[in-house]
Amino acid sequence: MQFGPAKHFFALLLAAPLLAGCLERGQPTMVDSSADDDAFCRSNNVAVGSNDYVNCRKNRDVQRGNANARADRAQRNLAEQMLNNPTRP
């Protein structure tokens, strides 16, 4: 029984969903958190555009960056620990 190109097409259809997961690499899609930051900074009774408001938004941005850096570092540490200490069944 010879199927020719149909066999390859069927194999490609089976492999396509598995390969689609490889497209999501690198940084995830950025989430717009400006509304949350704006609400947080306004809750301190600070006028939009004032120095206190700008400093609040800047601090929120720095905190978010630090949290992302900590998460990335924890992921790298976990991957390194798993590579250096493999468990064997």
Image (cartoon, rainbow, N blue to C red):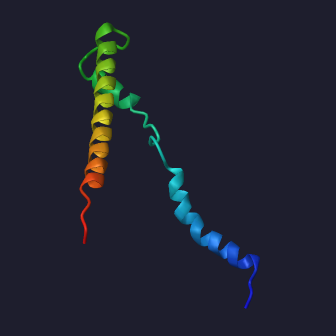
Q: Position of residue 10 (x, y in %)?
A: 66, 75
Location of residue 23 in the rendering, given as x and y in whole percent from the top left corner: 54, 51
Residue 74: percent from the left, percent from the top? 26, 42
Residue positioned most to the bottom? 1
Residue 58 falls in which quadrant of the image? top left
- Locate the N terminus and report the quarter of the image it occupies: bottom right
Tell me residue 43's x, y (percent): 26, 23
Q: Is residue 33 left or right of residue 71?
A: right
- In the rendered view, tell whether residue 89 sits above or below residue 74: below
Determine which quarter of the picture holds residue 34. top left
Of the pair 76 and 41, the residue shown nearer to us: 76
Against 89, residue 29 (above or below) is: above
Q: Which image quadrant for residue 13?
A: bottom right
Judge by depth and name the residue closer to the eye, 8 or 38. Answer: 8
| Residue at screen point 31% across, 44% down | 76
Which residue of the protein is positioned furthest toward the top in this rendering? 51
Going 25% across and 17% down the picture, which residue do you hit?
45
Q: Is residue 44 left or right of residue 58?
A: left
Image quadrant containing the C terminus = bottom left
Q: Is residue 15 above or below residue 76?
A: below
Up/down of 62 relative to 53, above or below: below
Q: Residue at x 28, y 27 (%)?
A: 63
Query: Which residue is rendered at x = 52% and y = 54% of the image?
Result: 22
> Foreground: 53 or 5?
5
The mark tally for this picture is 0
